[in-house]
Image (tube, rainbow, N blue to C red):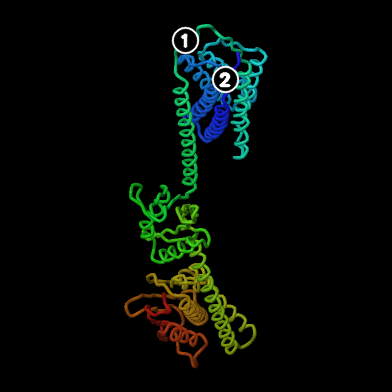
Amino acid sequence: MHHDHHSIFAALSVVVAIFGSWTALDLFQRVRSHEGRERLAWLALAALVMGTSIWSMHFIAMLGFDPGSPVSYNPGLTALSFFLAVGGTAGAFFAATWRGGRWPTVIAAGVAMGLSICLMHYVGMAALETAASLGYRPPLVGLSLLIAVVAATAALFAARQERALSWRLIAAVVLGLAIVGMHYTAMTALVLTPTAGAADVLPGAPPLVLAVAVAAGTVTILFLALGASLWDQRQNLLSVLEAGGVGYWEVRLPSGAMAASRRMRELFDIGPDEPLTQRDLVDRLTEDSRAEREAMMARVLRGEGEYAAEYQVKANGRWVRINGQLARDRSGEAKKLWGVVLDVTDRHEAFTAVAQSELRQRLLINELNHRVKNTLATIQAIATLTARRAEDLPSFKAAFEARLMALSKTHNVLTAHGWERAELRPLLEGELSPYATEQVRLEGPEVWLNAEGALALGMTFHELATNAAKYGALSTADGCVHVRWEEGADGVRILWSERGGPAASAPAKTGFGSRLVKTTVEGTLRGQARFDYLPGGLQVELRFPANSERLA
């Protein structure tokens, strides 16, 4: 008995097979990005789509089948054929991905899937009710089974691959054509034999009703599946951005309606449930950033480059970098601006810190240069005045070295505090350290001096200690130097008292030490120095202002 196929249904079946293969391969990629229950859910959805598309392709093609007499379909067998397609595909997909799915397992799953597809076809054919009995040519049945197994195995291997979009398109076309080829090979194996009187009894669903149901169901499932895949891809992308501290945003133009990710809202200090428009976002920027943003938008809308700028948020002081692209419609009108936002506060703080560090370094270099010049000038003055008072070269050498050591001790105290300040007590301890502890008594509160004042007092204490060792209390075993100091509203007062040594008498002419003390105290410290030559020993009183700009 002659039978025929309408070409429009054949073409539509090819489209459904390819579209279904594409959707199933796309969904299978979602499986890779999930674990646990979510992975199982995507596997089930991919299997449902693949099985449904195969089943739909079969029945859309059958709607174009013309056996030469009216046809209808048995609902029970039709439903069974659907479950065979979906169930076989689901089992094969799960087996192919179980514990990594080694290639022997994939081949076995492909064979099982091919058998279920082939069985779906012949059960679906058994659901066909017409005025003829159905028979098949065994060689072509075997060939259709082979095509089904090869197509199913290829589908599983293709689904496991993570390739480019073009590769997936080629795979979907090949798989779709293989599925269609299996169907029409099986239809070629069909042999129809007329049955007398059978044409008057044709129960079952009319072909038109079945066509509408199959088409509507298939299209709905495929588009919902693609929508779910796109939504999942978007969520995965947003999750990756969130994990990297990157925010996402979209602005509809010209309305200014805006959508923003959680990270975007955090950076701009906006609550998760607060309404958000483009104007709300702009109002949260500093005044300078708002002006820069207006200029940037104008350039982007004119087509002068992409959106890329850094702004400061007024509420929390953060700096953010915004990158975006403008989307236009076919007429060239701006429709949407979207992009990402990054927190670059650390970078701005680092730049500020570097700038401050460079400024501080320049200041330190200038200060070092100033101090080196002052130190050299002090050494020059010490050398000149020491040479004038020295009787011979050895005495000059001894006195000059001693004064340089005194200067070095003061430098050590200043270095411990970054050359910004020094305490009075360590200066005295450094100059009097060569002498017995029972011969030295220090008494006074904590008093801080700036670098210049510390250098001046360090040299002063050295001259007083040297004089006491030569002519005063430290020249005898029973002598003692008692230094007391205090700080009050009128300044700092230091009293150097010598006891137990030779009687003090005023020198016939002013020596280097006396001149140095007066010069440093009255000049550098802007204070006063008084020498009292008492029978019990020398007493020196130093006074200088504590609130001077030269003091810490």
Residue marked by disc 2: 117
Residue marked by disc 1: 200
For the N terminus, the quadrant is top right
Q: From the viewer's perspective, is residue 426 above or below residue 530? A: above
Question: Is residue 39 shown left or right of residue 447?
Answer: right
Q: Earlier in the sequence, mark 1 or mark 2?
A: 2
Q: Nearer the viewer, residue 542 or 83?
A: 83
Q: Nearer the viewer, residue 540 or 59?
A: 59
Res 203 → quadrant: top left
Q: Amino acid at mark 1?
A: Asp
Q: Position of residue 381 (x, y in %)?
A: 56, 86
Residue 349 in sight:
no
Q: Amino acid at mark 2?
A: Ile
Q: Nearer the viewer, residue 351 or 72?
A: 72
Residue lying furthest bottom in this view? 508
Q: Position of residue 521 (x, y in %)?
A: 44, 83
Q: Say the numbered circle drawn on residue 406.
A: none
Q: Residues within 10 Å of mark 1 (few under 14, many from 20)?
A: few
For the C terminus, the quadrant is bottom left
Q: Nearer the viewer, residue 50 or 446?
A: 50
Residue 425 in sight:
yes
Answer whether labels 1 and 2 touch (C-beta < 8 Å).
no
Residue displayed at 46% across by 82% down: 502
Q: From the viewer's perspective, is residue 375 above or below residue 235? A: below
Q: From the viewer's perspective, is residue 181 above or below residue 251? A: above
Alpha carbon distance from label 1 to label 2: 32 Å
